[in-house]
Image (tube, rainbow, N blue to C red):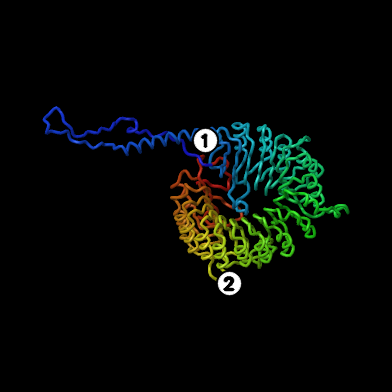
Amino acid sequence: MSEDDDRSPPSDSIANGSCPTRTCTPGSGSGSGSSSIPEYAAPYPDRVLENVFRKRSLVLNLTSWYRVEAMTRSDLFIGNCYAVSPERATSRFTRVRSVTLKGKPRFADFNLMPPNWGAHFAPWVSATAKAYPWLEKIHLKRMSVTDDDLDLLAESFSGFKELVLVCCDGFGTSGLAAVASKCRQLKVLDLIESEVSDDEVDWIMCFPDTETCLESLIFDCVECLVDFDALERLVARSPSLKKLRLNRFVSIGQLYRLMVRAPQLTHLGTGSFSPSEDVAQGELELDYVSAFAACKSLVCLSGFREIVPDCLPAIYPVCANLTSLNFSYANISAEQLKPIISNCHKLQTFWVLDSICDEGLQAVATTCKELRELRVFPFDPREDIEGPVSEVGLQAISEGCRKLQSILYFCQRMTNAAVIAMSKNCPDLVVFRLCIMGRHRPDHVTGEPMDEGFGAIVMNCKKLTRLAVSGLLTDTAFAYIGKYGKIVRTLSVAFAGDSDMGLKYVLEGCPRLQKLEIRDSPFGDTALLSGLHHYYNMRFLWMSACRLSHQGCQQIAQALPHLVVEVIKHEDVVHMDDYADTLYMYRSLAGRRHDVPQFVSIL
């Protein structure tokens, strides 16, 4: 959230009229005709006064805008839940209907942050329950949410319609049951990559027995059984349901029954996409092809959590209409992918495992000319293996998918030539994340660092705002980023760089940098202190397993008192006397937080 500090309009003695202008021109007076009155230069010329009045008008307009925004803003976005207190946010904006909150930084997804660090939803739900009883939507990302929080939410907001929990933890099926039973106008319940504990409460059965308002129900991350008969009844009495993503406990036979009930679906997560363990003969004989063919509006397909490849032909009828396809859980080969992807001419978003190999990516490049986003994830994330995708697949994509705007690409080997080709073939790239999983790996053909490849990306992709770098990189690569990455807002660095100069180039050269996350890189206090001029403009800086000292972190805290500087200790790390395990610092209007665990020191 962006919030200006309260400021009174500056007083201006000139604008208050204490010094009127005078213009005296030569003319006859009471004396002799030869005498004249001398000309006086105006001490405040008209153009100066005009600027003064403009300034006063601007201040008044800003004050009015501040008040108008407070009364009219309906959506509240807070990118860091510790950037402002719940009380200040709710008193500043009084008519909010939708709240979006983000908690832990992204590196928490990689187990780089100890459990129970914070980002608790409790103070926020308590404050919003008092301030916004009319609240309709809550979106949370990487927040710690309890069942009590969800129960308070369900009790407090009588017209609540939308709950989205992304990468959240701490709650279970009891909390979901409270939301399902008490939020009678619920339209969206999306649980995405969140950890949900099994409290042995069947939350699906808790939805009202009457017709529901549900438009989206996503629970593919929930690792426990649901009562399928209750789920089928729920789908049947939800005529507005457009998005449904099922967990791995829903078999393909059960999927068929749900599709028959809801042919209006536009987004479908298939569940396991395999027969149940105690499969009946009737489940094998179902006409899955006809069920998919009947879903004329289907444009987004995901799931395939425990896929049986023999079932894949069932989705052929919908391929021509798909704009989004997610195979990131499906261990399929290039040969299994080809008959599917060859019909996906409208595809704009594609997530897939590297099991499709370079050959599969070449098939994507041949067909998917409208592709905007590609993510290639590793089936086996070990660093010491020969991965199935390489520069060959990346270059094929760059040559065939010229409209690409975002790419995340995991691989074990890469070349500068392939990255340079992508920078030239896909100049509209906004996001480029290349993750070479082996540490400090050079161009595997020339043996050179990957400097020139990443340099080409920041030079040629003028719209680039997010960049992730990896592989063998020297300070030259960071010099390129500092020189050409003028609109880069998010930079992720892993196992890269060779001196403090690398980070200094970035901090001094990237004026719009908002989020900087670094792990296992050789940057120390000198590099850290080079960014003093910029840290107040950033949302956060994360540095783990670098060469930072406690003294260097303390210097930052002393120089920038309105910045929260956290030093995090990890139990499984061998501690050096004066070195900081992890530094996490962020701007905050609220100052030091009150829920600091023992392993965190706030300087």
Residue hosting label 1 = 69
Q: Residue at x 60, y 32 (%)?
A: 132
Quadrant of the drawing holding the N terminus: top right
Q: For mark 1, does the 10 Å Cα neighbourhood hold few (<14), some (14 to 19), or many (20 or more) residues?
A: some
For disc 2, the marked residue is 445
The residue furthest top is 30
Where is residue 164 shown, x and y percent of the image?
A: 66, 43
Residue 396, quarter of picture: bottom right
Percent of width and height locating residue 462: 51, 57
Q: Secondary structure at mark 1?
A: helix
> Left or right: 348 with respect to 44?
right
- The front one of 453 and 593 is 453
- Which residue: 74% across, 35% down? 181
Q: Residue at x 32, y 39 (%)?
A: 47
Residue type at numbered disc 2: Val
What's under tag 1, amino acid-wise?
Glu
Q: Quadrant of residue 339?
A: bottom right
Circle 2 SS class? loop
Residue 498, relative to residue 249: is it above or below? below
Residue 300 rendering spot, x and y as whole percentages: 70, 51
Q: Is residue 313 visible to the viewer in this orientation of the structure?
A: yes
